[in-house]
Image: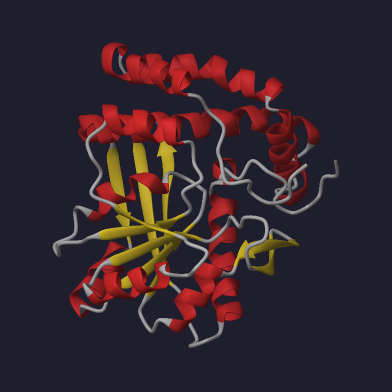
Amino acid sequence: MATEWEGKSRGSVLGYKIFVFCIKKLGLPVAYFVLVFVAFYFCFFAKNSTKSIYNYLRNRQQYSILKSVFSVYKSYYVFGQTIIDKIAISSGLRNKFSYHFDGIEKLQNILQAKKGGILISAHVGNFEIAEYFLNELEENVTISLLTTDAEHSDIKAYIESVTTKSSIKFIIIKEDLSHIFEINAALSRNEIICITGDRYIKETKSMTHTLLGKEAKFPAGPFLLGSRLKVPVIFVYVMKETNKHYHLYARTAKVKHRDPAALLKSYTESLEWMLKKYPLQWFNYFDFWNDLKD
């Protein structure tokens, strides 16, 4: 079983087409109803993912065996809801949802300082809808997402064809490190750089730190950048609270210049707090803590 993310998420274009049809023609409640059966499917046929999320619930969250089994299903269901919500919100149904802004003034302060800033998040909640929160800021904001280009291009192309075009720019991580120049240029234009700090790909530089009681590997890049670029760093999460309500959390990171280990420590403390509050919204469906063996 892989102990690092392999660069691609599960899913098919047909599956997305079914949910898009339900959302646009039949409504969100019907899409959520269909998801009941899809979540059951993944419980039984996504063997490695199911083992990984069960291990997280049983050993990291200290759930009982029975509670862990039922919570595997709940995790898949909530994850599916976040995907449906993302499609719905980006298709013009934003007003169907309510939002709570918690700490967003920290982002406003970054923009007013005209130095740019770095947002570090994780694969928890629904960070991909963060741009719809940031559009509420008084200052104009341009977001650049630092990412690999490994995700399924056919799914990305389909989603882009049925949703409103996102204003987010993409900075692709390259082996020659030329993306560093793009990052510096974006910051000089007072743009916000968004990075996730919880997935590393094999053969890339990593760092280790304790999360939920056991050491795990994290990508070194976000913490090297955040500790060296002399710009504010904010931890941001967008968490689902009810079917149609989201809560954005923005927290200022503790940053020491050229001390990526300290920034990683601050990040894991922040992430652990979030996972204690929203345990079912951990969406890293692989052997994150290297607990499972092939």
Name the one closer to the observer, 257 or 151: 151
Q: Residue 47, percent across and down?
A: 73, 28
Decide if residue 116 is on the left or right side of residue 202. left
Q: Residue 143, percent across and down?
A: 28, 59
Name the one closer to the observer, 165 or 92: 165
Q: Residue 6, percent across and down?
A: 63, 46
Name the one closer to the observer, 261 or 78: 261
What is the residue that sits farthest to the bottom in this orientation?
257
Quarter placement of the N terminus? top right
What is the residue that sits farthest to the front in this orientation?
176
User: Which quadrant of the structure image shows residue 289?
Assistant: bottom right
**Residue drawn where x is 63% and y is 27% of the image:** 73
131 over 229 or under it: above or below: above
What is the residue that sits farthest to the right in this orientation?
293
Is residue 150 among what the camera can see? yes
275 over 141 or under it: above or below: above
**Residue drawn where x is 59% and y is 34% of the image:** 75
Q: How is the image coloured?
A: secondary structure
Decide if residue 202 is on the left or right side of residue 275. right
Name the one closer to the observer, 26 or 101: 26
**Residue drawn where x is 36% and y is 43% of the image:** 246
194 over 95 or under it: above or below: below
Decide if residue 282 is on the left or right side of residue 32. right
120 over 25 or under it: above or below: below
**Residue drawn where x is 33% and y is 15% of the image:** 21
Is residue 244 among what the camera can see? no
